[in-house]
Image (cartoon, rainbow, N blue to C red):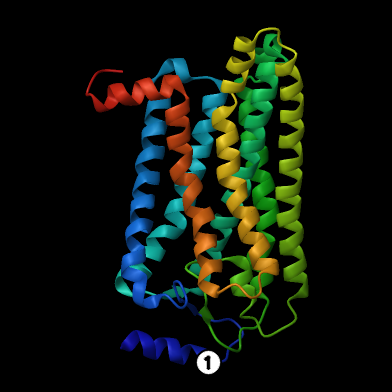
Amino acid sequence: MPQQDNLSGSNSTGVDPSVFFLTGIPGLEALHLWISIPFCSVFTVALLGNCILLYVIKTETSLHKPMFYFLTMLAVIDLVLSTTTVPKILSIFWFNSREISFNACLVQMFFLHSFSIMESALLLAMAFDRYVAICNPLRYASILTNSMIAKIGLVALARAVVLVIPLPFLLRRLPYCGSHVISHCYCEHMAVVNLACANTRFNNIYGIIVALFIVGLDLMFIVLSYVKILRAVLSLASKEEQLKAFGTCGSHLCAILVFYIPIVLSSTIHRFGHHVAPHIHILLANFYLLFPPMMNPVVYGVKTKQIRVRVLLLFRGKSI
């Protein structure tokens, strides 16, 4: 096959390769067509779910509140994450289209990592929203104004860009004089770094610091918010008030678990699971990329009454 010739010929030398080749899921190439079925299904649910969520929030004025503004940002981030990677993954599975230009690879990597960092920041912002709503309800409207929400969104974007923008430049200065075959479905930072034939210690250290800084710092503040929320809820007199307060946090807690558990699991196996088969690494990496965009609209649709009612009315063809 011509594609195989390209792959075998990709071991040519060169400092700045014009093209890389993605393997898909190494070791499971024969099953790519079957694997594409759940990938395509999850992608479709993620697109439909997040688009419906955005439409419902936009058209229903009662949902024009801080929590739903944050949810809108989260839906946009999930759409970008999905559309940045999944179409290329499916083209590998369906058409064996493994080739990706070096510049396109760096662009995909930038969007992938920056929007993942933004999603972590949004989950932290939503934890702050729940903290204010439960611990300072009388000041909720004065603290979480539209301008404050816009500032939080801009800070999340700026932080992501500042932390990720060095990665493409660091990768550009490395020589790639060996294989140009990336053992992955998409251009992930460490997968590209591993192809360089030079000292990559700085790239490795920078990547680890960014990951620990984001996951560690954001998770620490999220846990701190929920410790304060728990104290406030337990101080409420009646069981009914406690359950109602906990109910307002249910969707957000599910979103946190859906986002952070796969990331922590994948990172742990990637760093320490040296005896784990490569296809397990890749499948886990795809899981944490695909699962949150699919689950977030489902979780919020099921657990948030206002959204659930509006979606049901929408599907019944009634005016909302």
Q: Amino acid at mark 1?
A: Ser
Q: Position of residue 4 (x, y in %)?
A: 37, 87
| Displayed quadrant of residue 317 | top left
Q: Position of residue 107 (x, y in %)?
A: 53, 62
Instruction: Determine whether the residue tagged by mark 1 lies in a helix, strand or loop.
Output: loop
Q: Residue at x 63, y 49 (%)?
A: 117
Is residue 187 visible to the viewer in this orientation of the structure? no
* Front-lying residue, 303 or 113: 303
Q: Is residue 263 above or below residue 26?
A: above
Identify the image quadrant of the N terminus.
Answer: bottom left
Q: Position of residue 159 (x, y in %)?
A: 69, 46
Count of number-bearing discs: 1
Q: Which residue is mark 1?
A: 12
Quick one: which residue is furthest to the left in this view?
A: 317
Residue 32 relative to residue 193: left or right: left
Q: Residue at x 55, y 86 (%)?
A: 179
Identify the image quadrant of the C terminus.
Answer: top left
Q: Is residue 124 above or below residue 280?
A: above
Q: Residue at x 63, y 44 (%)?
A: 120
| Displayed quadrant of residue 67 | top right
Q: Residue at x 41, y 32 (%)?
A: 53
Q: Position of residue 128 (x, y in %)?
A: 69, 28
